[in-house]
């Protein structure tokens, strides 16, 4: 079992999950949507195509999907649909995005350095 720490604004929540589950699915199953009001209905269903399920995630999780690698490299939110849980992790939901999460290198660096 692993623990996902979910940060939503100033609130902290914990989810215990089994090895190998998909982060997007876990978030949705526990009523923590990585989507906005618009993209909750208009998304690719977790196939890594629309980039609307972005979340800030601690730096310990190595990206594997091409879009997730680019997001990690350039300071964009990571795709929750492309992250398989195989360790404890901390995830911050973006509550201020309209459709996609915007680039915020400073925020990404601060979040990643605080969660190592």
Image (tube, helix red, strand yellow):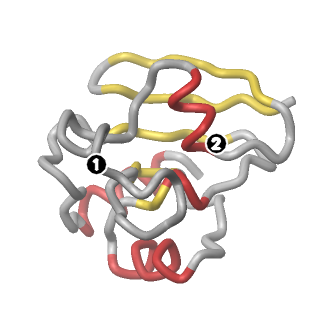
Residue 44 position (above or below residue 89): below
| Residue 113 place in picture, x, y as percent | 46, 56
For this view, does 10 lie left or right of residue 89? left
Q: Which comes before the other along the chain, label 2 or label 1?
A: 1
Q: Quadrant of the N terminus?
A: top right
In this view, the residue in front, 52 or 91, is 52
In the displayed structure, 104 sits above or below 1; it is below
Secondary structure type for disc 2: strand
Residue corresponding to mark 2: 89
- Check the image and report above or below for 11 versus 72: above
| Residue 23 point in image, percent of width and height | 61, 43
In terms of secondary structure, where does tag 1 sit? loop
At x 38%, y 40%, the residue is: 34
In the picture, measured across the screen, residue 104 lies left or right of residue 67, that is left
Q: At 22% from the left edge and 35% from the top edge, which residue is drawn?
A: 95
Q: Which mark is residue 42?
A: 1
Q: x%, y% of residue 75?
A: 33, 71
Q: Position of residue 18 (x, y in %)?
A: 84, 32
The quarter of the picture where residue 25 lies is: top right
């Amino acid at each position: 079992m692993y623990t996902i720490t979910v940060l939503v604004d100033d609130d902290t929540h914990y989810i215990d999950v089994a090895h190998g589950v998909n982060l997007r699915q876990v978030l949705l199953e526990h009523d923590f949507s990585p989507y906005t009001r618009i993209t909750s209905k208009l998304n690719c269903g977790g196939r890594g195509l629309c980039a609307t399920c972005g979340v800030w995630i601690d730096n310990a999780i190595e990206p594997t999907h091409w879009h997730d690698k680019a997001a990690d490299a350039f300071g964009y939110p990571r795709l929750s649909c492309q992250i398989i849980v195989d360790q404890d992790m901390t995830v911050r939901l973006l509550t201020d995005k309209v459709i996609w999460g915007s680039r915020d290198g400073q925020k990404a660096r601060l979040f990643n350095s605080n969660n190592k």
